[in-house]
């Protein structure tokens, strides 16, 4: 029988695990603190548990981590790690230090099954969902690997699910991991500082607010279906007239009403004044924050990033229409750690080529 990896269990799940072992619920509190606060992975070192319990845990459970395959620092302080998983695949995680924040961009899948045309992860194909412990492990390891940083002991303050994969197509594991991230017994992150980003998986958006209370970002990238169908083919399944009402249902049910809309700036594709006005009309009277993302190129993408002037002109129209708008600063470009540049090592199992051809959008 394979051992249960306790790293990815939320407080409720860990309490259920101990109940099955005939143990009291407070064992979960003890063990979570050992693992996530103190970084202890060896049951023998968990000295406030009885010797017999420690031995029993040894037999049925484990705290196992991926290995660090690659660790690269950018000139701007961004760091990219490649973590090697049991299955032989690897995923990428990016650390983005700012003055008052230390953000970790985590992956939720090995590869991605979506086919957004401006994203290099999409070119990799899809292998599998990450397990909750493989998501939590990215935060666990980042904190460990940062222990000897310039600011010693600096801990991750924000987690964004904006690495490889579509988080809402790996719903259960992402929700379980997010519960661990916001739990005081583990990482204690504020729900405002844990953000799940989605290309717009409508049925999952409807389930999210009830499952875990964290922030939501939506990769919109277009103000109308014609452009969005091209850029985010998932839009053909959940077009704007279906997506927007789902987001309107989400806001009042979540304690964080404001949704962030990500909008990648692609020269000549979605960046005109007309697009900006159309976007302002689409988002009017909604609690939104718009984040304009400079497109990060990769070989063969076929797109270019809008000029700085264009991005600012676009942003000014949104601001003039009362939309809170920011332009994301690109970080870690020199080490391919910027948005949309994460590739990991993915053995494609999705027959991507065939699907792309079927959708007539080429590989
Ligand atoms: N699947 C999720 C999360 C992963 S992508 C989602 O779609 O939201 C995280 C963000 O990076 C998304 O907004 C995505 O559209 C954006 N992105 C992807 N490729 C990019 C690129 N080449 N340049 C800039 N942003 C990109």
Image (tube, grey):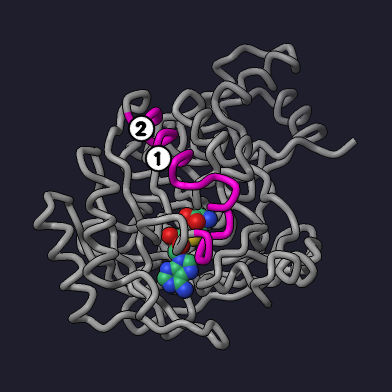
Q: Which residues are magenta?
A: 229-251
For the residue labelled by badge 1, is the local secondary structure a helix, a strand or a loop? helix
* Residue at the limit of the structure toward the left, as seen here: 320
Q: Work out whether residue 254 or residue 249 is closer to the camera in this orientation and state it.
A: 249
Name the main secondary structure of what is drawn in magenta.
helix
What residue sits 63% from the left and 50% below the top? 134
For the residue labelled by badge 2, is the local secondary structure a helix, a strand or a loop? helix
Left-right relation of 129 to 325: right
Q: CA distance from mark 2 to mark 1?
A: 6 Å
Q: Quadrant of the N terminus?
A: top right
Q: Which mark is residue 248?
A: 2
Other residues around mark 2 within 10 Å, as few (<14) / some (14–19) / many (≥20): some
Location of residue 361 (image quadrant): bottom right
Residue 89 visible in rendering: no
Q: Tell me if residue 172 comes above or below residue 105 in the rendering.
A: above
The image shows residue 30 at horizontal and vertical percentages of: 53, 26
Q: Tell me if residue 92 comes above or below residue 28 in the rendering.
A: below
Q: Which mark is residue 244?
A: 1
């Amino acid at each position: 029988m394979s051992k249960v990896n306790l790293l990815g269990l939320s407080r409720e799940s860990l309490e259920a695990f101990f109940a099955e072992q005939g143990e009291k619920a407070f064992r979960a509190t003890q063990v979570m603190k050992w693992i996530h606060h103190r970084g202890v992975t060896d049951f023998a070192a968990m000295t406030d548990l009885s010797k017999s319990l420690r031995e029993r845990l040894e037999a049925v459970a484990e705290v196992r981590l991926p290995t660090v395959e690659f660790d690269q620092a950018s000139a701007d302080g961004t760091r990219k790690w490649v973590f090697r998983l049991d299955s032989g695949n690897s995923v990428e995680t990016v650390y983005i230090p700012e003055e008052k924040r230390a953000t970790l961009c985590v992956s939720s899948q090995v590869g991605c099954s979506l086919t957004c045309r401006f994203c290099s992860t999409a070119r990799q194909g899809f292998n599998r969902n990450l397990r909750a412990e493989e998501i939590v492990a990215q935060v666990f390891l980042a904190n460990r690997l940062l222990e000897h940083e310039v600011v010693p002991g600096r801990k991750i303050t924000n987690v964004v699910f904006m690495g490889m994969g579509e988080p809402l197509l790996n719903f259960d594991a992402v929700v379980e991991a997010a519960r661990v991230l916001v739990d005081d017994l583990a990482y204690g992150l504020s729900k405002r500082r844990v953000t799940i980003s989605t290309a717009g998986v409508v049925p999952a958006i409807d389930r999210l607010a009830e499952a875990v209370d964290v922030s939501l970002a939506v990769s919109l990238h277009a103000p109308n279906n014609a452009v969005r169908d091209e850029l985010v083919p998932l839009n053909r399944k959940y077009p704007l007239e279906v997506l927007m009402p789902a987001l309107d249902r989400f806001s009042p049910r979540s304690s964080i009403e404001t949704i962030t809309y990500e909008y990648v700036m692609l020269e000549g594709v979605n960046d005109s004044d007309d697009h900006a006005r159309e976007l302002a009309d689409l988002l009017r009277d909604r609690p939104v924050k718009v984040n304009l993302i400079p497109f990060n190129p990769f070989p063969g993408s076929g797109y270019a990033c809008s000029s700085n002037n264009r991005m600012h002109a676009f942003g000014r129209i949104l601001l003039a229409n009362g939309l809170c708008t920011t332009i994301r600063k690109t970080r870690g470009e020199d080490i391919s750690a910027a948005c949309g540049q994460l590739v990991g090592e993915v053995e494609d199992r999705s027959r991507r080529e065939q699907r792309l051809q079927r959708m007539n959008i080429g590989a």
